[in-house]
Image (cartoon, rainbow, N blue to C red):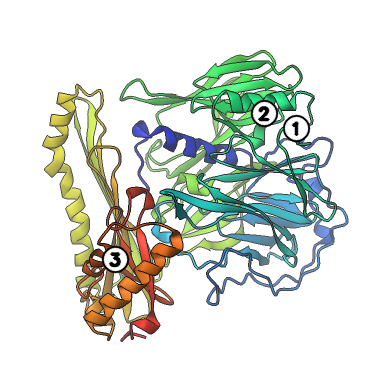
Amino acid sequence: MLTEDKSRMTLLGILRRIIIMALAAALIVTPVSFMAGCANPFSKEADTDEDADEEDEDEDEDDSSEEESSKPEESSQEEEIDTEDLTIPDMAVSSNIWNVAGRTIVFGRDRIISHDRKSGKNKLIWKDTKKNDDYSESNMSLFAEGTGIVLGDRIYFAKSGEYYSVDNKWLRDITLYSISIDGKDQKSLYTIAGVEGYDQDIAFKDGVIFLLYSTSEYPECLKLSENGDIEESLDPYSAGGFDYDTSEYIIQSVNQNGHRFLFPNIMAAECGKEIFVKGYNTLVAVDDKTGEEIEYRDQYPVSAFGDKLLVYHYNSQSNDASYDYGVLDLTNDKYKKLINTDQNLNIFAMDAEYIYYGEPNGMHPGVDFSYLKCDIATGEISALYTDKTSKSEVPNVGMWDVACSYSDGKLYTLLNKDYKLSFVEVDTESGDIENLVEDFYDPGIYDVGSLVYKNDSATHDGHEMISASVSVLQLDDRFPGAAKINKTLMEQADGVMSSVDDSLDECIQWYDESDGEYFIPYELTSDFGYIAYNDGKIINIVQNGYNYYGGAHGMPYWISYVFDLKTGERLYLSDLISITEEDLDEVLVEYATKHMNDIGEEYWEGYEETVKQYGGFDSENFILGDDGIDFFYDPYMLASFAGGFQEIVVPYSELNPKFR
């Protein structure tokens, strides 16, 4: 969902956002002090353009033969890279971008791309081979969730698998992968099974890889062998990565004093303190020599450089909530507030002089996203770069999905043109832009039409009561059925917008009865999701929605429209497949049962009838895929809300389609 009400974020939601911020903050500007006596891999000195091979093949993104697996895809492209000058640092933290051996290594959410700085060509080093239509999810995390480490001639990164259910808990496995920077040697090194967390990160120190996930109290400590494989998994009580006399005390204190989250990107402040978070709002600094603890209430770490820790505080005492960002000097425990804002910021870098961050939509009217820097000494804020390409036009992409990087006057980010995002390097002094990876994300909008946006809200007693926003695809008139299709799509959008007036009295009543103390504004959204299928004759458009009418959480929903591009008529299953309704019911129950067993989730009693009722000939709950039809069921239909949408894919071979 593109629009977020920050004033009502749950504690878990805040934790997830801050974890992403912490990872994003450890990007390009990883300080030299963290690299302990070796060249910063992001610096110009670390590049070896003269050794780079210019024979890279163009990036191959043909995934038509992808298998249902998260195993890295073997590259068939040949490339020679001189790795003689590549070094392994004593310490490194994950980043979206690495400049090594004359190449820029770009880590995306589901791919790793090598851009040859000299030839301008790209090579796909790794791609998630699981066929994944996650465009249906509201958070694409195109760039923010893609991070890794380059150690010498090898790339290390962590990838999480699909969720599965065990004892009513949704779990997934996290795997550490290693790939040579030429993409030829790819290995799966280590897997943590049955993880409840949703974010993962890695760090490296003194020959040890730290593999961390959001619900861990301490990282997996994996000692690397000379050939870059995992030699052994170390006991965290004595892991060489900590390498302190009091390491046992530190780990014990973590376990004894409740859940704490270790941030690997800031675990080696120059002052000799380990940084943990206890619970959700207490920052703990542990002296690595004496074991002495200092607690800083209501401060959350975002980034660090040297002895200074960038922290964040959420002021939630009123409806006019705000966010404070400041620097904590770990040598004297003094705190200095620098930035106060009514929206959460995208902090993407920090060095000895500045904090670098992005402001989201709305803070400067007419400007989609502003990149700024704040002087740590004076608090003065100045412009770094202004992006007027409006990334908000690209569906499923928000400010958290394009976590930027900054180094040596160069800003690395995603820019939009014709609803397509390209990964670029921006010279913040000259304003020159170099395309590194064109069309990094293309939702296919420009090929068929454009998006129309609408939003509205209503207030009472100076406070927002309800808001609604929509983005809806409108086809070009070159399609004969465009007018009829556009009318159908716009009618749904207008229905969402009318809810502002229809529900206002209800909101006011709830607000007045609670004196505003526990009131949370209603929120209604319907956003263009993605084009699932388009063969020039029929088109399948998916709309993602979310309704919040009070309570513990809102309800997400999907609407799938299949249209005849010539007539504009909406098509249903009976128009698309040739089997009988009785045969369809039988096939749906068969594949629903198989899916239930595969994920280990027990569906509600009587699920067979629900599957048939909402997947029948008159159903709208289906999406056309490459290999079959995806029948989807809203949360609570077949299983718990935590299980999310249940998707049952039936191969076309079982359905005898009329359109293929």
Q: Name the amino acid, label 2.
A: Ile
In the rendered image, residue 321, in percent from the top left (x then y), is placed at 36, 25
Dot 2 corresponds to which residue? Answer: 251
Spatial separation of the CA atoms under disc 2 and disc 3? 50 Å
Tell me if residue 178 comes above or below residue 326 in the rendering: below
In the rendered image, residue 55, in percent from the top left (x then y), is placed at 76, 71
The mark found on residue 242 in the picture is 1
Q: Secondary structure at mark 1?
A: loop
- Mark count: 3
In the rendered image, residue 470, in percent from the top left (x then y), is placed at 28, 52
Disc 3 versus disc 1: nearer the observer? 1
In the rendered image, residue 587, in percent from the top left (x then y), is placed at 32, 77
Which residue is located at x 56 percent, y 67 percent? 69
The mark found on residue 560 in the picture is 3
Mark before the other along the chain sequence, 2 or 3: 2
Q: Residue furthest right?
A: 84
Mark before the other along the chain sequence, 1 or 2: 1
Tell me if residue 313 comes above or below residue 71 in the rendering: above
Q: Secondary structure at mark 3?
A: strand
The mark found on residue 138 in the picture is none
Q: Name the amino acid, label 1.
A: Phe
Spatial separation of the CA atoms under disc 1 and disc 2? 10 Å
